[in-house]
């Protein structure tokens, strides 16, 4: 059974940092592209970024709204993807989902972790 | 940036009726790169359709997708009570890599 479990969310002050983790199981993690998607309360889905597999040079890409502030990484030995978030803004408040991508679509999603940026 | 516009914003129908949801792109999208998701309150989205018309694993055949270019449609042939949810279309492109429509809320009439 495929499972994606996010952790690391919480309350952080504006300008602060937070690192989310996404623990994967039930599939060949090392061969999969992993993405992060967020959703503010009552709003739609917003793509955050992605990291490809080793075979694709661990290439990363980011949405313009987070580029330069967020960094996605992965540890294939731990079957875990990460989202390092720096210089957080109140508008970054959202539920953050990690997803496994096959081709152009997310076929598996985690349950999400809530990040609240507030003073 | 490719913008996806979904219509209607809210669709009110009764169980047993047919639902037609639209997703219009600001530029042509490859059919291979168009997907639909369903999201229920408090849950993560679930993949329904990929490649514009292929059903994901375990998705009932009352769900179907169609379209090409800039106009795509998700059809639910006969609504079941569990189908009332929010639906999102998504495209995969160059920059930004992925964009979502704003969603269509399907509610019970």
Image (cartoon, coloured by chain):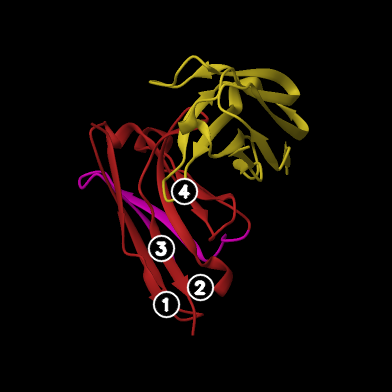
Foreground label between 3 and 1: 3
**Chain containing the residue with disc 3:** A
Report the residue at 68% width, 37% height from top.
B11
Foreground label between 2 and 4: 4
Tell me: residue A88, above or below residue A94. Answer: below
Please give the label number shown on residue A12.
1
Callout 2: helix, strand or loop? loop
Q: Which badge, 3 or 1, is on the more N-terminal residue?
A: 1
The residue to which callout 4 is attached is B41
Residue A18 in the magenta stretch? The answer is no
Return the x and y of residue A119 as percentages of the image width and height. 49, 85
Q: Are marks 3 and 4 on the same chain?
A: no
Chain B on-screen colour: yellow
Residue found at the very far bottom of the displayed protein:
A119
The residue to which callout 2 is attached is A88
Q: Where does the magenta region start and end?
A: A65-87
> Do callouts 1 and 2 mark residues in contact (Cβ within 8 Å)?
yes
Chain A on-screen colour: red
Callout 4: helix, strand or loop? loop
Q: Is residue A28 left or right of residue B76?
A: left
Please give the label number shown on residue B101.
none
Callout 3: helix, strand or loop? strand
């Amino acid at each position: 059974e495929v499972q994606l479990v996010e952790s690391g969310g919480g309350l952080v002050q504006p300008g602060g940092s937070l690192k989310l983790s996404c623990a994967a199981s039930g599939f060949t993690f090392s061969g999969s592209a992993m993405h992060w998607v967020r959703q503010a309360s009552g709003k739609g889905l917003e793509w955050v970024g992605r990291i490809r597999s080793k075979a694709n040079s661990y290439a990363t890409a980011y949405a313009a709204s987070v580029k330069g502030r967020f960094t996605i990484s992965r540890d294939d030995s731990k079957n875990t993807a990460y989202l390092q978030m720096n210089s957080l803004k109140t508008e970054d408040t959202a539920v953050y989902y990690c997803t496994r991508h096959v081709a152009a679509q997310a076929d598996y999603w985690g349950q999400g972790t809530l990040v609240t940026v507030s003073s | 940036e490719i913008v996806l516009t979904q219509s209607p914003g809210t669709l009110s129908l009764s169980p047993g009726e047919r639902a037609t949801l639209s997703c219009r792109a600001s530029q042509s999208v490859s059919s291979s790169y168009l997907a639909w998701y369903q999201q229920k309150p408090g849950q993560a989205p679930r993949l329904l359709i990929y490649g514009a018309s292929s059903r994901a694993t375990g998705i009932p055949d009352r769900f179907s997708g169609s379209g090409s270019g800039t106009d795509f449609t998700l059809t639910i042939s006969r609504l079941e009570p569990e189908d009332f949810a929010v639906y999102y279309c998504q495209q995969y492109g160059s920059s930004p890599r992925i964009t979502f429509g704003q969603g269509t809320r399907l509610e019970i009439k």
